[in-house]
Image (cartoon, helix red, strand yellow):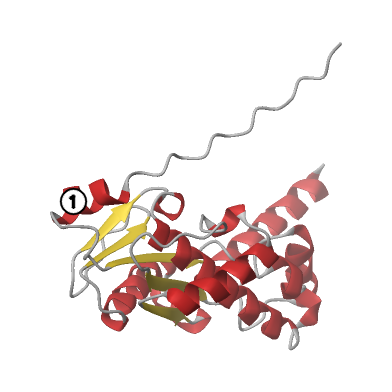
């Protein structure tokens, strides 16, 4: 029988930037400074939450300007350098694990964008997702925005490159968790290391507590069989 090829998921079609700016802010895209924002590390077991904000020149494009998850590490590094060179403005913000553990991840995910709005001057702000962000300027949110709006794509790339570098440095002080490779996410080798060595101060309580509870429940079930 012939082998059927898996159909690749179609990428979201980029909306026309001029239409987006006109419909959202009633402005001319050629003179409008649009600040795109995106975060990385929301679902990680360890490490800070990182987000970036970027204002791109009108009509600037790059072959790797897309959602950072669609790129290799080398492609992200290449795009990161190019974006920083041409950006009309950009900033990176971090929320520490200590603050995430104290105030919660939901708070952190909103707070980080609020800070970025204060750090970058623009005519309008937009970010990926469905959040309600109480900032000193209105923020428009857009689902799949990191693959639809160039400025959000740029922010996702800068944030990802920055956080990956942080996790590689953190790996040096706790190599048993292999953060160099898994970047703090819940890869099997990372989960096993947490169970073997216990949590580190850079681990997020909510994820580690859930992991340990699941392992405890599994052990109790296995012992009862």
Q: Is residue 221 left or right of residue 141?
A: right
**Res. 88 visible in picture:** yes
Q: What residue do we see at 39% from left, 67% from top? A: 109
The percent coordinates of residue 218 (x first, y second) are: 73, 51
Q: What residue do we see at 68% from left, 53% from top? A: 217
- The crowding category of the residue bearing disc 1, from other C-alpha atoms within 10 Å (few below 14, some 14 to 19, many at least 20), is some
The vertical placement of 51 against 11, above or below, is: below
Q: Is residue 196 left or right of residue 77?
A: right
Q: Quadrant of the N terminus?
A: top right
Q: What residue do we see at 46% from left, 65% from top? A: 154
* Mark 1, residue position: 22
The percent coordinates of residue 82 (x first, y second) are: 53, 72
Going by the picture, which residue comes out furthest to the top? 1
Q: What residue do we see at 58% from left, 34% from top? A: 9
Going by the picture, which residue comes out furthest to the bottom? 173
The vertical placement of 71 against 8, above or below, is: below
The percent coordinates of residue 166 (x first, y second) are: 62, 81
Going by the picture, which residue comes out furthest to the right? 1
Going by the picture, which residue comes out furthest to the left? 26
For residue 205, which quarter of the picture? bottom right
For residue 60, which quarter of the picture? bottom left
Q: In this view, does 86 lie to the left or right of 88?
A: right
Q: Quadrant of the C terminus?
A: top right
In this rendered view, identify the residue nearer to me: 109 or 193.
109
The percent coordinates of residue 46 (x first, y second) are: 61, 73
The vertical placement of 171 against 212, above or below, is: below
**Res. 204 visible in picture:** no
User: Which secondary structure, mark 1?
Assistant: helix
């Amino acid at each position: 029988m012939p082998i059927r090829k898996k159909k690749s998921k179609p990428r979201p079609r980029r909306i026309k930037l001029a239409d987006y700016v006109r419909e959202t802010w009633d402005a001319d895209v050629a003179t409008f400074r649009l600040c795109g924002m995106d975060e990385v590390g929301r679902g990680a077991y360890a490490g800070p939450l990182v987000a970036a904000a970027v204002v791109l020149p009108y009509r600037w494009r790059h072959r790797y300007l897309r959602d950072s998850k669609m790129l290799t590490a080398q492609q992200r590094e290449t795009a990161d350098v190019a974006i920083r060179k041409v950006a009309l403005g950009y900033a990176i913000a971090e929320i520490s694990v200590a603050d995430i553990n104290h105030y919660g991840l939901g708070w952190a995910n909103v707070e980080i964008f609020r800070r970025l709005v204060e750090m970058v001057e623009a005519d309008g702000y937009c970010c990926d997702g469905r959040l309600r962000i109480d900032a000193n300027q209105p923020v428009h949110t857009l689902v799949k925005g990191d693959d639809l709006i160039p400025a959000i794509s740029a922010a996702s790339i800068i944030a990802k490159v920055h956080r990956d570098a942080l996790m590689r440095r953190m790996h040096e002080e706790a190599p048993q968790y292999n953060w160099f490779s898994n970047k703090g996410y819940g890869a099997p080798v990372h989960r096993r290391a947490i169970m073997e060595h216990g949590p580190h101060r850079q681990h997020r309580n909510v994820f580690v507590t859930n992991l340990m509870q699941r392992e405890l429940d599994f052990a109790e079930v296995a012992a009862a069989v």
